Amino acid sequence: MTALRDRRCVPCRGGVPALAAPQIQALLAEVPQWTVSDGRLRRRFDFADFAAAIAFVNAIAAIAEAEDHHPDFCVHYRQVDVTIWTHAVGGLTENDFVLAAKIDAVG
């Protein structure tokens, strides 16, 4: 099976069901530093300073644009909180885990 970071996000159409708990647990094994709460993937990244945090945000923005799948993020000086979920299904899809793995490769 192809690693998550080597996959591409696929266009999401509404009406597709969100992943069930067993599927989520299986995919979490590939992105172990992420957690799931309130139906969303979450992770905090720590950096040496503000400039490094912003460089990271710019890098993940480029990935998000290339994948056409966009996370929420919040910068707290040298920390960046990233939250991912698929708005169209109101929960998690494989795309969210693909994006998380690609972000892990940068962070």
Image (cartoon, grey):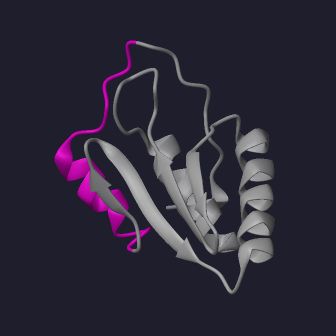
Query: Does 95 appear above or below 48?
Result: above
**Could you say where residue 71 lies in the image, as x and y percent from the top left?**
58, 44
Can residue 40 be seen from the camera position used here? yes
Query: Does 53 appear above or below 39?
Result: below
**Pick the front one: 5 or 2:** 5
From the viewer's perspective, tell me whether residue 35 is left or right of residue 12.
left
Quarter in which the C terminus is drawn: bottom right
Q: How many marks?
A: 0
**Could you say where residue 10 lies in the image, as x and y percent from the top left?**
61, 33
Can residue 2 be seen from the camera position used here? no
Query: Does 21 appear above or below 103?
Result: above
Furthest-front residue in this view: 77
Question: Does residue 102 belong to the magenta stretch?
Answer: no
Question: Does residue 21 belong to the magenta stretch?
Answer: yes
**Pick the front one: 41 or 44:** 44
What span is in magenta?
Answer: 15-32
**Could you say where residue 42 lies in the image, as x and y percent from the top left?**
41, 57
Furthest-left residue in this view: 21
**Could you say where residue 90 lies in the image, as x and y percent from the top left?**
35, 26
Q: Residue at x 77, y 40 (%)?
A: 65
From the viewer's perspective, tell me whether residue 88 is left or right of residue 25.
right
Q: Residue at x 55, y 73 (%)?
A: 45
From the viewer's perspective, tell me whether residue 35 is left or right of residue 75.
left
Q: Residue at x 61, y 26 (%)?
A: 11
Q: Residue at x 29, y 60 (%)?
A: 26
